[in-house]
């Protein structure tokens, strides 16, 4: 089932507005020419039938399908990206066929496309991206020649998506995460708002959850040093991010914050007319930046983890429950696990994957022999005092999470 949602497009240049109108005019011209061709072909077919008692085969006469013929004839006049032009011509042909009988009987006048034509955008022409809490759509609009004339560059233009409500945001998030797949959409002009918008079409992705085995568990270990490590018991392969991007970013912001604090302490009285609120304003902005960055990174991570689970055929993800970490601390002292877990949870749910929580990841336990080491594990290496197994702490912990309550002794593994 395909649904659509209306999203206004923000663009920073008047040239883009002008370009869209130019493309709209071009679309209208192409559509009317296409209808003309279809009409001529239709008449020819009727005549041909009278003479030969059968309809002509387009390939014998035109060397193409009717759609292919129109594309070939119109491409030199088109400013549109080739995939979008194909979409447009297909839609015209479909519309023509639906009404052809009425045209022939004279019940309807032949289609004439007026000036407010939408731009048809092929699904492959839309790429969503996410940066600092904002969604963008890179949309391939035009062919190379038009792009050269317009900006001397790429055929795709970036648009900031103006997302007004939470439900639209959820839809865009799911399209971005691949939970929904984007299909052919339309760009139109809103006369009242004087803005361009996209009618984004989306549907459920057709992936099968039947193949996911609930007994196959992906252990996901979250830690400050290595944001996440995911593995399946007995599997040497793992998915891991070993650089804490958020921490790095937060540290940079933290030092900036300290310098602002120092500044405002020094000139506190001197800033006449600037109250406390004014002085902490830059700090507020910084904390928003941290939150936005966290959001973007956690989206990326949770998406990768859930995709990895699907790739490994895991119907279950097991994690350590990390609710104890304070979310109220503005400058979170720790890796913001809670947000990441929430995102993993919702993405897993969309794919029919269960989430199971355990109290502790058992980082002292050896994933190979099951021995629980008494000495506290320090540093990033785990070394079993019993069997000598040595690996990084995070991998060992994710293996234990994957094994869960089962007998974690696995024979025959290196
Ligand atoms: Zn061991």
Image (spheres, rainbow, N blue to C red):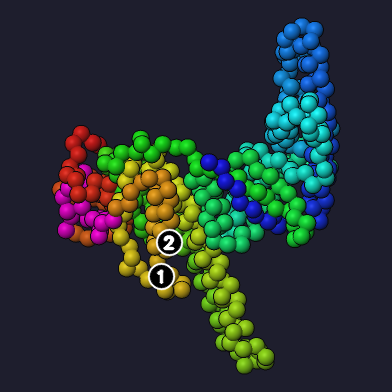
- Left or right? Give the position of 81 relative to 134: right
On the question of residue 181 being in view, the answer is: no
Q: Residue at x 56, y 67 (%)?
A: 289
Which residue is labeled 2 in the image? Answer: 339
382 in magenta:
no
Q: Residues within 10 Å of mark 1 (few under 14, many from 20)?
A: some
**Dot 2: within a 10 Å radius of its alpha carbon, few (fewer than 14), some, or many (20 or more) residues?**
some
**Of 259 and 220, the residue lying toward us:** 220
> Which sits in the foreground, 291 or 111?
111
| Magenta segment, prevailing SS (helix, strand or loop) | loop
- Does residue 359 lie above or below 406 as drawn? below
**Nearer to me, 346 or 406:** 346
**Residue closest to the far top:** 52
Q: Is mark 1 within 8 Å of ligand 1?
A: no
Query: Where does residue 383 sit, x and y in percent of width and height?
Result: 24, 50
Q: Residue at horizontal 25%, vertical 60%?
A: 359
Q: Position of residue 393 (x, y in %)?
A: 30, 52
Write the start and end of the magenta stretch as one range.
Answer: 357-374
Residue 39 in the image: state x and y as whole percent: 81, 25
How far is mark 2 from mark 1, CA to CA?
9 Å
Question: Residue 165 is drawn in which quadrant?
Answer: bottom right
Q: Are marks 2 and 1 in contact (CB under 8 Å)?
A: yes
Circle 2 SS class: helix
Q: Nearer the viewer, residue 369 or 99?
A: 99
The residue pinned by badge 1 equals 327
Element carrying mark 1: loop
192 to the left or right of 202: right
72 horizontally vs 311: left or right = right
Q: Of marks 2 and 1, which one's residue comes earlier in the chain? A: 1
Residue visible at 67% across and 92% down? Answer: 272
Q: How far from the left and from the top, in percent, is residue 13?
A: 78, 56
Q: Residue at x 46, y 73 (%)?
A: 330
């Amino acid at each position: 089932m395909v649904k659509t949602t209306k999203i206004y497009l923000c663009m920073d240049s008047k040239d883009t507005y002008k370009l869209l109108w130019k493309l709209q005019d071009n679309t209208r011209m192409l559509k009317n020419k296409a209808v003309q061709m279809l009409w001529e072909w239709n008449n020819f077919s009727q005549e041909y039938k009278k003479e030969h008692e059968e309809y002509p085969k387009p390939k014998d006469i035109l060397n193409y399908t009717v759609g292919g013929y129109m594309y070939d004839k119109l491409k030199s006049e088109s400013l549109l990206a080739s995939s979008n032009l194909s979409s447009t011509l297909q839609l015209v042909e479909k519309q023509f066929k639906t009404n052809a009988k009425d045209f022939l009987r004279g019940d309807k006048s032949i289609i004439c496309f007026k000036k407010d034509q939408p731009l048809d955008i092929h699904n492959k022409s839309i790429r969503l991206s996410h940066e600092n809490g904002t969604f963008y759509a890179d949309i391939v609009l035009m062919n190379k020649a038009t792009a050269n004339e317009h900006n001397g560059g790429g055929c795709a233009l970036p648009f900031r998506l103006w997302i007004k409500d939470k439900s639209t945001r959820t839809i865009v998030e799911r399209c971005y995460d691949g939970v929904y797949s984007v299909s052919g959409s339309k760009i139109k002009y809103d006369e009242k708002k004087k803005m361009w918008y996209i009618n984004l079409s989306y549907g459920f992705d057709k992936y099968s959850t039947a193949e996911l085995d609930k007994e196959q568990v992906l252990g996901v270990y979250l830690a400050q040093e290595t944001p996440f490590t995911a593995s399946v018991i007995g599997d040497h392969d793992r998915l891991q991010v070993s650089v804490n991007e958020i921490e790095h970013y937060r540290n940079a912001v933290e030092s900036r914050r300290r310098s602002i604090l120092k500044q405002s302490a020094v000139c506190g009285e001197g800033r006449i007319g600037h109250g406390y609120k004014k002085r902490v304003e830059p700090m507020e902005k910084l904390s928003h930046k941290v939150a936005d960055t966290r959001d973007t990174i956690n989206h990326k991570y949770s998406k990768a983890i859930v995709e990895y689970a699907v790739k490994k055929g895991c119907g279950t993800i097991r994690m350590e429950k990390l609710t104890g970490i304070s979310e109220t601390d503005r400058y979170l002292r720790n890796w913001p696990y809670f947000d990441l877990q929430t995102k993993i949870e919702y993405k897993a749910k969309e794919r029919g994957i269960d989430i199971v929580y355990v109290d502790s990841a058992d980082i002292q336990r050896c994933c190979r022999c099951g021995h629980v080491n008494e000495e506290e594990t320090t540093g990033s290496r785990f070394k079993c005092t019993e069997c000598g197994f040595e690996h990084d702490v995070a991998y060992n912990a994710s293996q234990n999470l994957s094994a869960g309550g089962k007998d974690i002794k696995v024979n025959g593994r290196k």
